[in-house]
Image (cartoon, coloured by chain):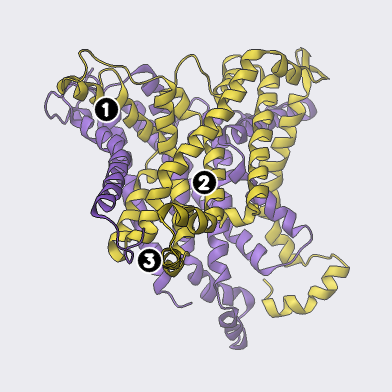
Chain colours: A yellow, B purple
Amino acid sequence: MSSVSTLSATEGQERKIPIIKLGTFLLMLPLLLWLFLLIILPHVDLLMVSLREKLGYREYAFSFQNYIEFFTEPLYWNTFVRTAVMSIIATVITLIVGFPISYYIAKVMKGKKRSLLFMMCLIPFWVSELVRTFGWMILLRESGVISSFLQWAGIVDGPVEMLYNDASLMVGLVYTSMLFMVVPLVSVLDTLDDSLIEAGYDLGGNTFNILREIVIPHAMPGIASGCIVVFMLTLGNYLTPTLLGGKDGLWFTEQIYNQFITRFNWESGSAFGFLLLILSSAIVFVGLKLSRQTLADTVK
Amino acid sequence: MIPSIPQSKFSTRLYAAYVTLFFLYLAAPLVVVGVFAFNDSLFPSMPWNGITFDWFLGTESPRVGVFHDSQLLESIGYSAFIAICVTLMAVAVGTCNAFLFERHSFPFKNILYIVALMPLVVPGVILGISMLVFANSLVNGIEDLFGFELDILRPGLFLVILGQFAFVTTITTLVISARLRKFDTSLEEAALNLGATKWEAVQTITLPFLKPAMIGAGIVCFLMSFENFNTTLMLVGSDSPLTITMFDRLKQGSTPALNAASLMLMVVSGGLALISVFVQRDRTAAPE
């Protein structure tokens, strides 16, 4: 391994003639194997499979048939739009619910209490998503805790089914994504100097003004990275929609799973997968452009 | 808004009430899963019939506890095996990548860095199907060329390990790189001046410095692998890990044995999380 001092001395030459040292090359091998064999080639192959049509056993022809099928079949198209819209709604709700909490942790709480509260926010996310979803099923189902409580309190007469609809789905999605909103928001609000808020009050601002003029503009990078991550995770979620969502509205990942595993139609499944990938990347790209950030900033 | 600005009692209390409600919302599903592991009933639902330990220790059908449920135990074994393999591979490759990105210059560095971040943006289901499709193409290609079937690339444990490794490595790379960036290279140069070889210097000075980050990243990897669902679902064969087994049971409707398994899962991940917090704390105490 070369030390930094020799590296900077030779950097000028290396720029002119791109010769890689043997040590660097050996160190690059795992990276290249990882990226090419497990990331790049599989995705290229996915694209190729999505662009072919099955003629017979192991006989294929190039065609856009799978994509045409997607756009002409309203079921697929509707699922796609529904998934995108629901993901956006879930992201907005997560932001609205999570922002006051992050503000409370970052600005109102101090010292030990503050770290304790922050830790409490993180704990649920060390637990498997499956267990969390299972918890919501026990709470919301017809014979569940909330239904029993409502009957006991005399608010309703019979058992209420609260599972398998869009509202229960939303509760689960927001729950699952909360951490990814709270963490970036807390870290960005941490850097906001209290004196700026005080100055805002001194100049005669009220809570609403100060929130709009000082706090939110300052928190914008955190809001952007939180929203991007939450949106991506929601869009690609499979577990929560399958277990908490209704039978009438499929999630797009369920559609992909069905094509692959149930119908064994890999060609159209690949096309759907690629479309989801494009949608997800496009929204991430737009989000980054709007907030003037780069992907590398977001992961920090 | 902040403690130094006087606010009306009503709005302060309202705010505190909201925060309390939020934490109730966070805790409710986890508490419920844990509590119903002890319910003396065949289903994880109301009414509450009193406390039993059958769902941990029971031996006779229909009251088979986790410790006697061979299918669940087997799947825990598979999950642990997968998680250990993924963790070891991801930490090793992540450490190499950290040195590479922090210390070396090579062509296409920025592009490779962006590609290395890609797994964070790709949904797990898609990572899974792309791996499935590619592995299948490889099997078919090898069969056509050499006339034998490479069964290891059929859906199963090996593919699950590769699939999880593919995205977990991004996280180890980021965590270990961040730590390496804080390292004062003059320490390594001092070792070189004192007559150490480059490898000796890295081994005795740099790697111990990176250790907290490597352990922390390793724990995160282990948990992510153990709890991964989306990628695993697409790549799994007949040997299903814990999350897949639990998912199948959940869809069919299950006895509170599932709650008992979940409770154990929560205790183990909680414990590991605490360990990683302590390792993290070690980090601030270390010289920088």
Q: Quadrant of the N terminus of chain A?
A: bottom right
Same subunit: marks 2 and 1: yes
Q: Is residue B250 visible?
A: yes
At label 2, the amino acid type is: Val
Q: Kindly identify which residue carries mark 3.
A: B281
The chain that hosts pointer 1 is B
Q: Nearer the viewer, residue A68 or B163?
A: A68
* The C terminus of chain A, quarter of image: bottom right
Give the alpha-carbon distance from disc 3 to disc 1, as whole Å: 36 Å
Residue sitting farthest toward the right = A16
Q: Residue at x 25, y 33 (%)?
A: B32
Measure the alpha-carbon separation of dots 2 and 3.
Answer: 25 Å
Residue A242 badge:
none
Work out whether residue A59 or residue A147 is closer to the camera in this orientation and state it: A147
User: Would you say residue B242 is visible in this rendering?
Assistant: no
Q: CA distance from mark 2 to mark 1?
A: 28 Å
Same chain for the residues under marks 3 and 1 in the image: yes
Looking at the image, which is closer to me, B119 or A45?
B119
Chain assignment, label 3: B
Disc 2 target residue: B86
Whichever of callouts 2 and 1 sits on the residue coming sooner in the sequence is 2
Q: As shown in the figure, which amino acid type bears the numbered disc 1?
A: Ala
A81 shown above or below A129? above
Q: List x then y, in percent, for residue A270.
A: 68, 25
In this rendering, position of residue B192 left or right of residue A9: left
* Amino acid under disc 3: Arg
Q: Position of residue B180 (x, y in %)?
A: 56, 68
What residue is shown with label 1?
B257
